[in-house]
Image: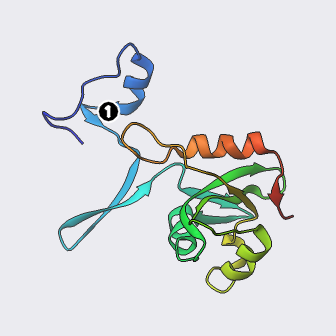
Amino acid sequence: MRGPGVFKEYWDKPEATGTAFRAGWFRTGDTAVVENGVYRILGRTSIDVLKTGGHKVSALEIEEVLREHPAVGECAVVGVSDPEWGERVAAAVVLNDGQVLDLPSLRTWALTLLAPYKVPTRLLVVDALPRNAMGKVVKLSVVELFQSAGEGDSVD
């Protein structure tokens, strides 16, 4: 994007500015499509496509399904590095009040709606998802939560 409302540079970060801008255009990192003359933002380009077991998987698709679970209030799906699979599908969830959720029950439920390779193999229940000043979930911080938690609730 570009225009009078778009900032010109990152404060004191010339490398970040150089990466984010090309020929005067700010690269948001979002993927969008044009449908019937209307732009529809699908999500983040880099962090929302997971590569697991040779499959490219949309984190946004999995999140959409997981939000249908009665225990899930919010969720963020990320890829967690794995030597065998490349990445494992990992879901951080904020539960609705009074709800409980464990990985085996989530997997059983999700297998009725998703292909097996899209079903999360890691689950982390959190009080809140990490967000930036704009209120967007910071997926890299979610990955860090999984790295800090170690194996936790996971399946091989």
How dense is the environment of label 1, judged by Cα within 10 Å: few (below 14), some, or many (20 and up)?
few
- The quadrant in which residue 114 appears is bottom right
Residue at the top extreme, as displayed: 12
**Closer to the camera in the image, 84 or 61:** 61
Q: Residue at x 56, y 49 (%)?
A: 128
The three-letter code of the residue at mark 1 reads Arg
Q: Residue at x 36, y 41 (%)?
A: 134
Provide residue 66's location: percent of width, then percent of height. 58, 71
Provide residue 22's location: percent of width, then percent of height. 32, 33
Viewport quadrant of the N terminus: top left
Viewed as shown, does residue 55 lie left or right of 136? right
- The quadrant in which residue 39 appears is bottom left
Q: Residue at x 20, y 74 (%)?
A: 36
Residue at the right extreme, as displayed: 156
Q: How is the image coloured?
A: rainbow
Viewport quadrant of the C terminus: bottom right
**Closer to the camera in the image, 152 or 49:** 152
| Figure check: 144 above or below 80 | above
Q: Residue at x 72, y 60 (%)?
A: 123
**Closer to the camera in the image, 125 or 88:** 125
Badge 1 marks a residue whose secondary structure is: strand
- The quadrant in which residue 52 appears is bottom right
| Figure check: 1 above or below 30 | above
Provide residue 55's location: percent of width, then percent of height. 66, 67
Viewed as shown, does residue 64 lie left or right of 153? left
Which residue was labeled with disc 1? 22
Provide residue 86's location: percent of width, then percent of height. 75, 54
Residue at the bottom extreme, as displayed: 112
Viewed as shown, does residue 93 lie left or right of 23? right
